[in-house]
Amino acid sequence: MNDQTVFELIHAMEQVTNRMIIKWNQSFNEGLGISHILLLSHLKRDGKMKPIDLAESLGIAPSSISHLIQKLSKRYYIKRIPDLNDKRISYLEITDEGLEVLKKAAEDGHQLQKNTFAQLTNEEIKQLLAIYQKLNLTLDQM
C-alpha cells in the first residue's frame, strides 16, 4: 500500500469519527461534551480516582481536567471524597445523577451508531469488525 492510500484511509477514518462526535454533540442536549462523558465513563468503570490519575489515564493535561471536573461537580455528576488519612488528597466519584446522564449519553450514542451502520450490509459490518480487530491486535503488539 502506498503512502497516499494510507493517508486517504486514515483521513477517512478520522472524518467518520469526527463527524459522529459532532452529530452526537448536536443530539445530546445536556450541555456536556465528549470529554465530560469520557471522564464519567472512566469513573464508572474504574471507581473513585484522584484527579491527577484520572487526567493521566485519559491523556488530558491536569489544567484541562480541572475545567471538566468543575462543570461536572456543579451539576452533581461527580463528587469529591476526602482521603481519611491525608486531608490534602481527594478522590472523584461518579454520583447517581452522573450515572443517569452517562446512560442517556450512551443511549444517544447507540442510536447514532445504529443509524450510521444501518447503511452497511451484514457482510460489510463483518469485514469492518474484522479489520478493526486486526488493527487493535497490531496496536497491542507495538
Image (tube, helix red, strand yellow):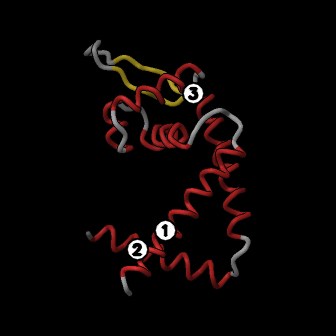
Position of the C terminus by quadrant: bottom left
Secondary structure state at the residue bearing disc 1: helix
Q: Amino acid at mark 2?
A: Leu
| Picture coordinates of residue 13, whole percent (x, y) | 51, 68
Instruction: Residue at 38%, 25% (x, y): give it.
Output: 91
Between marks 1 and 2 in the image, the one whose residue lies nearer the viewer:
1
Q: Is residue 89 left or right of residue 29?
A: left
Q: Which residue is mark 1?
A: 11
Q: CA distance from mark 3 to mark 1?
A: 35 Å
Instruction: Residue at 37%, 85% (x, y): give it.
Output: 2
Q: Residues within 10 Å of mark 2 (few under 14, many from 20)?
A: few
Upstream in sequence: badge 1 or badge 2: 1
Secondary structure state at the residue bearing disc 2: helix
Secondary structure state at the residue bearing disc 3: loop
Q: Which mark is residue 77?
A: 3
Q: Is residue 43 left or right of residue 33?
A: left
Q: Is residue 2 left or right of residue 30?
A: left
Q: Residues within 10 Å of mark 3 (few under 14, many from 20)?
A: many
Q: Residues within 10 Å of mark 1 (few under 14, many from 20)?
A: few
Q: Is residue 101 left or right of residue 60?
A: right
Q: Amino acid at mark 3?
A: Tyr
User: Pointers 3 and 1 in contact (CB under 8 A)?
Assistant: no
Q: Using the image, determine if residue 141 lies above or below residue 127.
A: above
Instruction: Residue at 55%, 77% (x, y): give it.
Output: 128
Q: Using the image, determine if residue 41 lies above or below residue 88.
A: below
| Picture coordinates of residue 41, whole percent (x, y) | 51, 42
Q: CA distance from mark 1 to mark 2?
A: 16 Å
Q: Which mark is residue 135?
A: 2
134 or 82: nearer the viewer: 134
- Report which quarter residue 64 is drawn in: top left
